[in-house]
Image (cartoon, grey):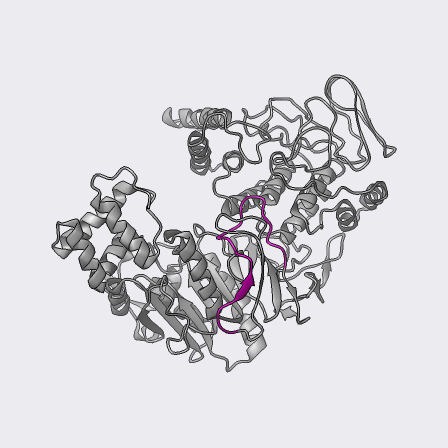
């Protein structure tokens, strides 16, 4: 137990007991934890720490009261409306199609607090015509919160969400409060449950073979071993094809149970796969070694697995698409199915490749159809480039001549004429300002920056000696495409000369999918896919956008690919799409400082100055928390000190006009 800067040794002793009994992780803010413990002790009428520890050991109500202080019961009706919209548009129609009109849907709010979440579930089901064919369960560790939920009286604070109006029809004003209608109230079954205890799932409680589980913004409070245990029990509580929604701050669960992670434009949800399906554990995780998990053939009980899963995906880890051992497919309304091989079947084609549309998430043009079943986040072809965001580590306008510069490089270094910020790829030709020439042995030529002459063999990145830049996360200079610096991982597979030639011919006739396939962007290895996208960027920027979306759909939990996609979209001047991609990268890896910096610049160009300032402050804070000389992930060797200065300078430039009453 980390002691921290405690004012009294009794505080960490109390927290150690809480961690033992409830699985809560040590708090990140000792001062707030002390205040919460002090308030709970005062309500219990106890001032001695030893006496209080004995009290919460023997008195479950006292422990519940303390847990309420140590966690945040933040909730309101239809919080995170994207989850409810996905239920409405995708999950509920699929259940009705699969099971028929008389099927009873089962949902569970796993940490319901004062009840707004499960009541929102019930209201949605009623509005969608499920009537008597619904069962909504709601549990919490706080008995006080459960009492408030059963009473169902709410204030304006519970109505602050963007979907609040959808709930007003079920609420009756009474003084300064709103009283929930009996029709909704009777649909929800409340009960006490401590998620950290091995008392669930069970048929008796109803937490069993569920269609939908909301366990949002809860796992962040648990330690690693508790998260792992809860993940396995969440999986066991779902029925076949059931879906799990977690919160944006919760850790990834793909490596802890045979749950299929599905990345959408708003975040990740998980799906329980059919029995006999094998799911690969991510390449690395902070709490264990990689392995492979298999859904039990019976579909019941706790999942069996070989190897130890971790609590999430480390940056650069991959969550590979599951392959169904039984050969079954999962169909969704609106087209397509998830095939055992990981591809989409039976869906109409779209775009140059004839790729499947899948379900298609809101805000995206039809893409290739990810094996996850929601449709790949493919984008329609864009056009044009914009001038000069510059390298994220430097002032706007520096770096690339056109489009976006590579993050973390000195102004003007390695700018290219194809897609600035990307080194000449395998077998490509391009002209970049500077001295000297370079050649490749694949029969192609390229003029490069840098002093002297550089040469590469076929299948290498084509980057010459000098100041050429690579896509973030990859080493600049010659060598195999995408060779990661300092990771110790094997080099990605490089395309052969014949594959390079075939890819160029495919690009010439506009067949982006064939080009992506030949270059390796559809490879099962995320490093190979990322390197291939980088190479394609130097041949055809629009094709690279397509390839990056394809690669990201196959590796939904790799933040590097989402960040790369954002850079490409930004280079195309597609700011809303770039914002969406960089936010997805940050969802997967919230500590990615360079992505916060890029987000700040995107938001600035979109006119969202408050959002830009917030992103820049986040980048600055992340860098300042590191040693000054620490290299930053995906920043091409940029040090924390330099990126912090860049974020600070840009923030000040935005803030100064605001203080003077002028537009930035």
| Vertical relation: 154 (above or below) 7 | below
Residue 259 showing in the rendered view: no
The percent coordinates of residue 499 (x first, y second) are: 83, 44
Taken as a whole, is the magenta stretch helix, strand or loop? loop
Of 81 and 150, nearer the camera is 150
Seen as rendered, the residue at the extreme bottom is 102
| Vertical relation: 303 (above or below) 317 | below
Seen as rendered, the residue at the extreme right is 443
Q: Is residue 624 magenta?
A: no
| Vertical relation: 194 (above or below) 185 | above
Residue drawn at the location 69% of the way across and 61% of the way down: 343
Please provide the residue range marked out in magenta. 300-321
Q: Give the quarter of the image for residue 334.
A: bottom right
Q: Give the quarter of the image for residue 505.
A: top right
The percent coordinates of residue 486 (x first, y second) are: 60, 34
Of 223 and 96, nearer the camera is 223
Residue 509 showing in the rendered view: yes
């Amino acid at each position: 137990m980390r002691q921290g800067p405690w004012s009294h040794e009794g505080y960490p002793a109390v927290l150690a007991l809480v961690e033992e009994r409830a699985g809560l992780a040590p708090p990140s803010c000792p001062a707030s934890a002390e205040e919460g413990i002090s308030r709970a002790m005062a309500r219990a009428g106890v001032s001695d720490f030893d006496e209080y520890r004995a009290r919460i050991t023997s008195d479950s109500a006292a422990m519940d009261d303390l847990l309420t202080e140590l966690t945040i019961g933040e909730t309101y009706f239809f919080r995170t409306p994207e989850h409810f919209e996905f239920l409405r548009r995708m999950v509920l129609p699929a259940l009705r199609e699969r099971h028929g009109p008389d099927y009873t849907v089962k949902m569970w709010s796993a940490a319901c607090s004062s009840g707004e979440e499960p009541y929102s579930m019930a209201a949605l089901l009623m509005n969608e015509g499920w009537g008597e064919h619904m069962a909504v369960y709601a549990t919490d560790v706080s008995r006080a919160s459960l009492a408030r939920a059963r009473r169902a009286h709410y204030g304006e604070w519970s109505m602050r969400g963007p979907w609040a109006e959808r709930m007003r029809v079920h609420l009756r004003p009474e003084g300064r409060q709103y009283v929930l209608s009996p029709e909704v109230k009777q649909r929800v079954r409340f009960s006490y449950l401590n998620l950290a205890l091995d008392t669930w799932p069970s048929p008796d409680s109803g937490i069993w073979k569920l269609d939908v589980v909301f366990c949002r913004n809860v796992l962040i409070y648990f330690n690693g071993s508790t998260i792992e245990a809860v993940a396995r029990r969440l999986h066991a509580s779902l029925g076949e094809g059931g879906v799990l929604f977690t919160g944006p701050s919760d850790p990834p669960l793909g490596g802890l149970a045979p749950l299929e992670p599905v990345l959408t434009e708003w975040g990740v949800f998980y799906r329980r796969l059919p029995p006999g399906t094998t799911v690969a554990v991510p390449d690395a995780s902070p709490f264990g070694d990689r392995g492979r998990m298999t859904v039990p053939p019976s579909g019941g009980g706790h999942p069996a697995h070989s190897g130890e899963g971790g609590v999430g995906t480390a940056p650069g880890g991959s969550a590979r698409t599951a392959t169904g051992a039984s050969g079954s497919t999962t169909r969704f309304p609106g087209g397509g199915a998830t095939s055992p091989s990981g591809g989409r079947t039976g869906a109409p084609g779209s775009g140059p490749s004839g790729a499947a549309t899948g379900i298609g998430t809101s805000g995206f043009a039809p893409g290739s159809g990810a094996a996850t079943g929601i449709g790949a986040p493919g984008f329609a072809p864009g056009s044009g480039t914009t001038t000069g965001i510059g390298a994220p580590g430097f002032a706007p306008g520096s770096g690339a001549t056109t489009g976006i510069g590579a993050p973390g490089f000195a102004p003007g270094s390695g700018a290219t004429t194809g897609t600035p910020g990307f080194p000449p790829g395998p077998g490509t030709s391009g002209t970049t300002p500077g001295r000297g020439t370079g050649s490749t042995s694949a029969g192609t030529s390229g003029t490069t920056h840098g002093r002297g002459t550089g040469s590469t063999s076929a299948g290498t990145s084509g980057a010459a000696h000098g100041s050429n830049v690579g896509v973030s996360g990859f080493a600049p200079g010659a060598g195999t495409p995408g060779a990661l610096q300092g990771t110790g991982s094997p080099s990605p597979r490089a395309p052969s000369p014949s594959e390079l030639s075939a890819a160029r011919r495919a690009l010439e006739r506009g067949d982006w999918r064939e080009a992506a396939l030949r270059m390796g962007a559809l490879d099962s290895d995320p490093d190979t896919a990322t390197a291939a996208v980088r190479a394609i960027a130097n041949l055809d920027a629009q094709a690279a956008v397509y390839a990056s979306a394809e690669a990201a759909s196959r590796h939904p939990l790799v933040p590097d690919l989402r960040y790369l996609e954002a850079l490409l979209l930004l280079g195309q001047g597609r700011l809303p799409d770039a914002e969406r991609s960089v936010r997805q990268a940050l969802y997967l890896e919230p500590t990615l400082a360079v992505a916060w910096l890029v987000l700040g610049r995107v938001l600035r160009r979109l006119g969202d100055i408050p959002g830009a300032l917030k992103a820049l402050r986040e980048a600055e804070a992340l860098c300042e928390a590191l040693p000054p000389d620490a290299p930053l992930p995906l920043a091409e060797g940029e040090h924390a000190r330099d990126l912090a200065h860049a974020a600070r300078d840009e923030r000040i430039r935005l803030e100064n006009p605001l203080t003077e009453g002028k537009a930035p």
